Image: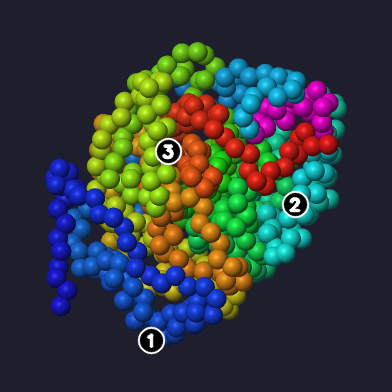
């Protein structure tokens, strides 16, 4: 008979007695025929339930969810106490025009002369073109959107024809791209100003006229796209050209980016390695130089993980800061839409365009007004010296290779030395409880959304790794979901107490760099929860608690694969982490390397 466990109320927990426990996920690593057989077994009525139950017990989920008395009441979506205003910021009007917000954000950026980049090699190290570079090239008639579009079309078609297939996009219409680019070129010829004027792509939300497949072979058959998602519409008003719908891990249910339906996107730094997921295509496209920015979704690190593995920047906003209407996951409580870009500056511009809380979230969440850091004055970076950065060392160092923790530590030391940021040791209790609450929350919400389609027979058309996840999600009961929400309130209490002492929590973004792609996983996918555990080790608080977080590339491991540093901010504190991210980016600029697969679509002959 199971022994009942009673948790002490969160406010009475003795943090000095908390000891860090390394995560060890017990589950088989399977590919190929063995994986197919495993899926067949776990979907079987009786034996499948027994196997899932055993795995949950081995991973201490059953005891936590069903044998534990949790004193906190449920928190069914993030709830935040009132927040102090951020210093040194400029407010943005979320009810105003997206292009006006971008205009304000542009004025907040540091001075920059794009012309210098066209007068020889002004910087010895590799650098990506910024949105401001594209705008300058178009205004100066050095290039046109139509010429750049042709370069992009050529590369995308080249990737789609590789053997085995490595599609960056799973919905792509060259003529539609040419039409958008021609209209943009005409606007420049006529002198009409549109502020972002970038090429971008998106994943599992609506971008008319492209179908929203979500990485599946059937979602577009049961869900018709009639108009753009809210965020897509806001970017279009800024002159953005959408290239297409990017590849992704099916329905976002994976961290590697493996997609056996269309082919797996490859890491631009090493084609034998994963990009990370689930927003695999967007990160790969940005890292390859094909687009200035991309849109992704993040319900379990799906923006930050691929950004880290591909060496680009990914912002996960506060839950509710962006309107997720028009997304396949628009009914959940852990997911957001956010930007992936090659630079912090471009992330800030795209963020400024897409932000704006939905009416329902505005009522329930009472968000602080959105803002961006004012970086246009010399004293802006001096304000970094007042920031307190919280680091839980035992957690920070729990990585697959010390290359990751060492590189992130070196970056933080350089940051403190250069700008005077104070490092504060913190404790983050109950990390296992946080991970369990997250998987129950996102899994239950995902199952609720997909059940009607699966009951219609489409469940059998899902890939094997998605079906494995669905088998786990079906094992969660209503009481499991409520217990997870009680844990969410508990974990929120701990983090709000931490933010009374620090301004930002710092961690590596992932616990490992890009994993290798097993050849046996290309056809039918794989399940490897050990890899998933490393990739998701540091990202969960951003999703379960809805906190803003950003991943910035800070260097490479000994094999040359990118390493990301994560900054987790206070609720509604995007401006603070953007300011800090830009300072880190500048400190690490000289170490940036050109990816093995990179295309200069702006300056290409």
Q: Which residue lies under the disc numbered 1?
A: 46
Closer to the camera in the image, 370 or 112:
112
Give the number of the disc on residue 522: none
- Residue 20 among magenta residues: no
Residue at the image point whose x is 41% and y is 27% from the top: 414
Residue 223: name its quadrant.
Answer: bottom right
Foreground mark, 3 or 2?
3
Q: Which residue lies under the disc numbered 3?
A: 407
Q: Furthest residue to the top?
A: 378
- Residue 138 among magenta residues: yes
Segment tinted magenta in the rendering: 127-144
Residue 70: name its quadrant.
Answer: bottom left
Residue at the image point whose x is 31% and y is 54% from the top: 434
Element class at badge 3: helix
First along the sequence among labels 2 and 1: 1
Q: Give the x, y percent position of residue 415.
A: 41, 26
Element class at badge 1: loop
Q: How many marks?
A: 3
Q: Which quadrant, please, contains the C terminus?
A: top right
From where the camera sits, is residue 340 visible? yes
Give the number of the disc on residue 156: 2
First along the sequence among labels 3 and 2: 2
Q: Give the x, y percent position of residue 256.
A: 52, 58
Q: Which quadrant, please, contains the N terminus?
A: bottom left
Q: Give the x, y percent position of residue 381.
A: 45, 19
Neighbours of disc 1 within 10 Å: few (<14), some (14-19), many (20+): few
| Disc 3/disc 2 C-alpha distance (Å) | 33 Å
From where the camera sits, is residue 84 visible? no
């Amino acid at each position: 008979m199971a022994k009942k466990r009673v948790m002490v109320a969160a406010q009475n927990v003795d943090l000095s007695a908390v000891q860090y426990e390394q995560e060890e996920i017990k589950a088989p690593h399977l590919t190929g025929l063995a994986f197919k057989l495993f899926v067949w077994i776990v979907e079987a009525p009786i034996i499948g339930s027994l196997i899932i139950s055993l795995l949950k017990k081995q991973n201490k989920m059953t005891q936590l969810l069903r044998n534990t008395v949790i004193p906190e009441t449920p928190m069914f979506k993030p709830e935040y106490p009132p927040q102090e205003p951020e210093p040194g910021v400029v407010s943005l009007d979320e009810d105003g025009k997206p292009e006006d917000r971008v205009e304000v954000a542009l004025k907040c950026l540091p001075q920059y002369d794009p012309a210098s980049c066209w007068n020889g090699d002004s910087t010895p190290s590799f650098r990506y073109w910024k949105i401001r570079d594209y705008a300058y090239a178009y205004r100066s008639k050095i290039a046109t959107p139509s010429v750049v579009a042709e370069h992009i079309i050529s590369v995308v078609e080249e990737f789609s024809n590789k053997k085995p297939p490595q599609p960056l996009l799973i919905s792509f219409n060259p003529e539609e791209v040419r039409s958008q680019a021609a209209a943009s070129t005409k606007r420049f010829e006529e002198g009409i100003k549109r502020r972002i004027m970038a090429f971008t792509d998106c994943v599992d939300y609506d971008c008319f006229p492209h179908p929203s497949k979500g990485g599946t072979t059937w979602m577009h058959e049961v869900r018709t796209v009639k108009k753009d998602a809210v965020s897509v519409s806001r970017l279009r008003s800024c002159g953005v050209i959408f290239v297409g719908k990017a590849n992704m891990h099916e329905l976002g249910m994976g961290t590697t980016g493996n997609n056996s339906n269309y082919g797996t996107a490859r890491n631009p730094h090493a084609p034998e390695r994963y990009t990370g997921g689930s927003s695999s295509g967007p990160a790969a496209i940005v890292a390859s130089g094909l687009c200035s920015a991309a849109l992704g979704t993040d319900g379990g690190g799906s923006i930050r993980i691929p950004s880290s593995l591909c060496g680009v920047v990914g912002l996960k906003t506060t839950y509710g800061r962006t309107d997720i209407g028009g997304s396949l996951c628009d009914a959940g409580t852990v997911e957001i839409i956010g930007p992936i870009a090659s630079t912090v500056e471009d992330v800030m511009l795209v963020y400024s365009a897409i932000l704006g809380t939905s009416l329902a979230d505005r009522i329930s969440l009472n968000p602080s007004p959105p803002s961006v850091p004012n970086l246009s004055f010399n004293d802006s970076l001096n304000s970094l010296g007042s920031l307190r950065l919280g680091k839980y060392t035992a957690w920070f160092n729990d990585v697959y290779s010390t290359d990751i923790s060492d590189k992130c530590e070196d970056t933080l030391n350089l940051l403190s030395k250069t700008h005077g940021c104070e490092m504060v040791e913190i404790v983050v209790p109950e990390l296992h409880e946080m991970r369990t609450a997250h998987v129950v929350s996102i899994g239950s919400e995902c199952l609720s959304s997909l059940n009607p389609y699966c009951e219609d027979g489409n469940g059998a058309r899902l890939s094997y790794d998605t079906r494995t996840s669905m088998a786990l999600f079906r094992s969660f009961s209503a009481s499991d979901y409520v217990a997870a929400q009680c844990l969410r309130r508990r974990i929120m209490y701990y983090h709000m107490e931490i933010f009374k002492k620090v301004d930002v929590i710092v961690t590596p973004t992932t616990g490992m760099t890009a994993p290798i792609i097993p050849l046996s996983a290309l056809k039918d996918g794989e399940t490897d929860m050990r890899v998933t555990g490393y990739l998701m080790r540091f990202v969960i608080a951003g999703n379960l608690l809805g906190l803003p977080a950003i991943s910035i590339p800070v260097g490479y491991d000994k094999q040359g694969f990118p390493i990301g540093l994560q900054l987790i901010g206070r609720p509604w504190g995007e401006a603070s982490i953007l300011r800090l991210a830009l300072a880190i980016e500048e400190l690490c600029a000289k170490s940036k390397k050109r990816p093995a697969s990179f295309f200069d679509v702006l300056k290409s002959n």
